[in-house]
Amino acid sequence: MSAAVIVTGLGVVAPTGLGAAEHWRRTLAGDSAIGRITRFDAERYPSRLAGEIAGFEPRDHLPSRLIPQTDHMTRLALLASDLALADARTERPERPEDAFSVGVVSAGSAGGFAFGHRELHKLWSQGPGHVSAYQSFAWFYAVNTGQISIRHNTRGPSGVLVTEQAGGLDAVGQGCRHIRQDIPRVVVGAVDGSPCPWGWVGQLAGGRLSTRDDPRRAYLPFDREANGQVPGEGGALLVLESAEAVAARGAPRYGEITGYAATFDPGPDSGRPRTLRRAAELALREAGCDPGDIGVVFADADGRPEEDAAEAAALRELFGPYGVPVTAPKTMTGRLSAGGAALDLATALLALRHRTIPPTVHVTRPDPAHELDLVLVPRPLRAPAALVLARGQGGFNAAMVVTPSAGVPTPQAEGQRR
């Protein structure tokens, strides 16, 4: 079969909107969704800001029988899968041979906190002999993917990756492998977050969160006042298809996944360099791209000064000082754990479709030491490819190149279709 892997559907559930169209509209407008946490009382915590999904009422989107069987993050993931498959204009497979031709690969990291919190309450209230915290996390990730498979009758290969913020890209990379192994269609990506007290304690223990209360000054990647991160919830699921499957049914096309690579950093005491640049180089090589072919980099944008400096150094070494436009739309949503990179990938595909780079918001004093061409207001996309970067806590790195695919609708046609 052809090596081409084409994205035919996007299912976005983000603080910036439910659905790709609403997310793109708000992102392009620089409409930040970061604010005070409302899902629980956070007044006693040193960090009180998050990117939350407002207005999500499960009963408006899912059958009532599913509500008591699922948790918040699984409900969001089910909605994302509904949106992605509807956007790809696919029908639910009914014949067994068709069901086995569709797979699901997702990623998880913080999403299990809320599920684990609930299960620990059971453990504490019912005494020994019940589910452990470790088992509850494993169960959550399996249930999340399994619920999507059951809802859409997909019986092809499935799996869950746990590489923190890099997980969204790693799940897409695994989906690409399945496509190249003759699976016609795979639902991939991640919906993640930690909207519960236990999850918040876990985030705080890592020492990565900003403690500022002003939503406009808390998460400032690459800024002189960068001081940490703001978490969020949500992400995106995407439908991947082989070129043959797309041609056979005349499916819509957002773009093509042309390059992907993952690396792992050596230990901090090893004296060896970190490997984000290597991941980007490998992804470009697989895509057959030169650095000059990249029109925008969607940065990991950690938000801590030392981590921003490390990413900026990798970009300088690869593209040269101010050598490529760099953007971080996640400044409007916060960092969504595994869901963050999947959402960045969906946003990059929308940027290709609309030939526009979305902005980084709230950053008012970019650190000149980084030598980055940081996109602070929307600008035209001048080159035909986008590079998406992600780093996960513990040393995970992932890079993915996306390019336009033949037959991508114009923005005007997209507006008419939606």
Image (cartoon, helix red, strand yellow):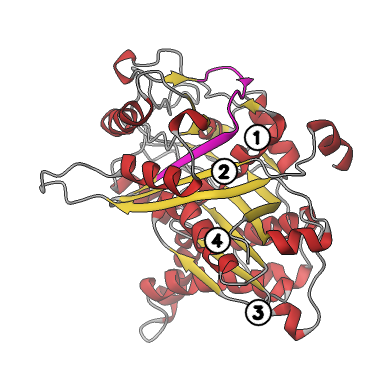
Q: Earlier in the sequence, mark 4 or mark 2?
A: 4
Report which residue position mark 2 lands on.
402
Amino acid type at circle 3 is Arg
Residue 352's disc is: 1
**How crowded is the residue under tag 1: few (<14 C-alpha within 10 Å), some, or many (20+)?**
many
Disc 2 versus disc 3: nearer the observer: 2
Q: Secondary structure at mark 1?
A: helix
Report which residue position mark 3 lands on.
155
Residue furthest out toward the right: 416
Report which residue position mark 4 lands on.
176
Can I make out residue 40 in this image? no
Q: Earlier in the sequence, mark 2 or mark 3?
A: 3
Q: From which residue to which does the magenta span run? A: 375-390
Q: Earlier in the sequence, mark 1 or mark 2?
A: 1
Q: Is residue 214 magenta?
A: no
Q: Tell me if residue 368 comes above or below residue 382 in the rendering.
A: above
Instruction: Tell me the residue at 70%/35% (across/down).
Output: 353
Q: Secondary structure at mark 4?
A: helix
Left/right placement of residue 164 relative to residue 341 reads: left
Q: Earlier in the sequence, mark 1 or mark 3?
A: 3
Amino acid type at circle 2 is Val
Quadrant assignment, res 42: top left
**Contact, mark 1 vs mark 2 (Cβ under 8 Å):** yes
